[in-house]
Amino acid sequence: MPSESVANRSPAATDLAASGSGHTGARVITQPLPKIPDDLREAAYHAIALARFTIHPDGSVDVDLQQPTQQPRLNQLLLSSLHNWRFFPATENGKPVESHQDVRVHLVVQ
């Protein structure tokens, strides 16, 4: 059976809200998620992690798991996928700026 992952931005945990007419928040362009191997399917069943992204002006990211799952190997797979996410950067007065965004990642195995 295939596995599926879902990622949701956590509105309460983000600092990207527009703070004035000259500021827009970063928007995700691509968000690849890991394929869960059979031996981790049980551990991944409804696992949730909280990832903190630093989004650079060029749209590339640095990411850390603020709240990892309880399975270290699953966390490694997840981090590997999260490093491949790309964003339209936040802007301030029309210029790209660095920003941060927290994303709650739900791993759902079907």
Image: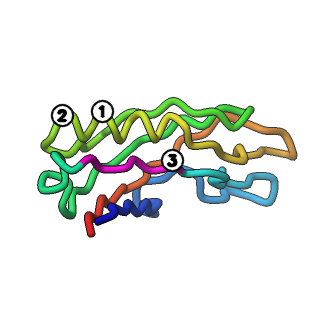
Please, what is the dominant secondary structure of the magenta stretch?
A: loop
Q: Amino acid at mark 3?
A: Gln
Q: Residues at badges 2 and 3 in contact (C-beta under 8 Å)?
A: no
Q: Position of residue 67 (x, y in %)?
A: 25, 44
Residue 72: image tag: 2
The residue labelled by disc 3 is: 101
Q: Amino acid at mark 1?
A: Gln
Instruction: Tell me which segment is drawn in magenta.
Output: 32-37
Q: Secondary structure at mark 3?
A: strand
40 lies left or right of 50: left
Q: Secondary structure at mark 2?
A: helix
Residue 23: image tag: none
Please report whichever mark, 2 or 3, sits nearer to the chain's N-terminal start.
2
Residue 51 against residue 105 in the figure, above or below: above
Q: Which residue is found at the position 59% from the left and 52% from the top?
A: 16
Q: Which residue is found at the position 18% from the left and 61% from the top?
A: 45
Measured Cα–Cα span from mark 1 to mark 3: 20 Å
Q: Secondary structure at mark 1?
A: helix
- The residue at the far bottom in this view is 110
94 lies left or right of 51: right
The residue labelled by disc 1 is: 76
Q: Relative to the observer, which residue lies in front, 67 or 25?
A: 67
Image quadrant where one finds the N terminus: bottom left
Q: Which residue is found at the position 30% from the left and 50% from the top?
A: 36
Q: Quadrant of residue 48?
A: bottom left
30 lies left or right of 52: right
Measured Cα–Cα span from mark 1 to mark 2: 6 Å
Q: Residues at badges 1 and 2 in contact (C-beta under 8 Å)?
A: yes
Q: Position of residue 5 (x, y in %)?
A: 38, 60
